[in-house]
Image (cartoon, rainbow, N blue to C red):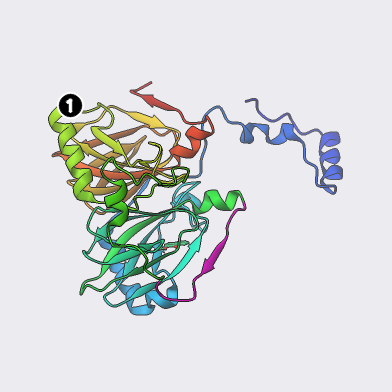
Amino acid sequence: MSVAPTETPERKAFYERIDKDNLTPLWSVLGDLVTPEPKSGCQAYGWKFDKVRDAMLEAGDLITAKEAERRVLIYENPGLRGQSKITTSLYAGVQLVLPGEVAPAHRHTQSALRFVLEGSGAHTAVNGEKTIMEYGDFVITPPMSWHDHGNETDAPMFWLDGLDIPLVSMLDASFAESLGEDEQPITRQTGQSYAEFGHALMPINADVSRTASPIFNYPYVRSRETLEAMKRGSDPDACHGWKVRYSNPLDGGSAMPTISTFIQMLPAGTTMPYRSTDATIFVGVEGGGKTTISDVAIEWGPRDVFVVPSWKPVVHEVASESLLFSFSDRVVQEKLGLWRERRGNV
Ligand code: 1HN
């Protein structure tokens, strides 16, 4: 759009006069409001897990999971400091639950995802059912579902949390409450949701109008099997390798209403440049390599997190087969008719 018109003394006097009545001229701000391309404070950036892990263990000495409610260190985008955002629309953090600890039951309108980074066998409970978490598992807590976490193992458990907090704040739609108990009552068998909905079957009376997936733990062993089968049966996509999205078996849509989630296997080599309007958070799962986002190169390995802003071209380069989990607000943009992508160097 055009540059702002010059400020004459008469115009300036006028702006100051109307300012008192909370009015402002569009022609002074239009260029910043409606840009020819996405323009964001969000920056390309990466966090090494080893460093985050050390800080988390220090936090473990300073505060209990119960006192903190959630013992989390927030990944703050360097271009959005002080806002608890990893991208303009999404929040991410690393959570630590030590042996014997509980993170007490609560619920909120924000959707949350967990992606397990370290440990084996701790649990999360969602809407009356427990699930045991393993490395690479992807777990969801849909809007307003009760959730609490516990670690009955003898090792610390770390996972990445992704939430739509900035999106919900923008809409002024935050509601939250505590249950008042550490753990919610368990009314379903562990693994029941996956057994009922995870095999292309579902109970005949299932409520298919739910906006989030009835599966709340997508186990890594299954995701990996799918990617291995795709690798055996098809050529990799030039931009993405073999890539799948986590879907809601009720309607084929996104597992959560506001956050899209993906896992991909990259063959050894370099991907074709790719850009899309959904700023994306990536998590290394296996292997590792270098991802170049415009002119910023980020080295990553398992458990490392990096962020790609909207509409910045991305190239992944891996020496051997590597896996990446990722999430973004793509589902929201698609529903609003805003999502765009571009393949190749154009
Ligand atoms: C939350 O409920 C969890 O349940 C983690 O583990 C992080 C950050 C902000 C608000 C709620 C959790 C959160 C959160």
Q: Residue at x 43, y 45 (%)?
A: 259
| Image position, residue 224 (x, y; %) | 19, 44
Quadrant of the image occupied by residue 69:
bottom left
Name the quarter where the C terminus is drawn: top left
Quadrant of the picture in which ligand 1 is shown: bottom left
Residue 184 position in % (x across, y down)? 41, 70
Quadrant of the frame with the N terminus: top right
**Kind of residue at badge 1:** Ser
Residue span colored magenta: 172-183
Q: Magenta span has 93?
A: no
Mark 1 crowd level (few <14, some 14–19, many ≥20, 10 Å Cα): few
Percent of width and height locating residue 158? 29, 63
Helix, strand or loop at mark 1: loop
Q: Position of residue 127 (x, y in %)?
A: 41, 61
Q: Identify the residue under disc 1.
A: 234
Say whether residue 243 is left or right of residue 225: right
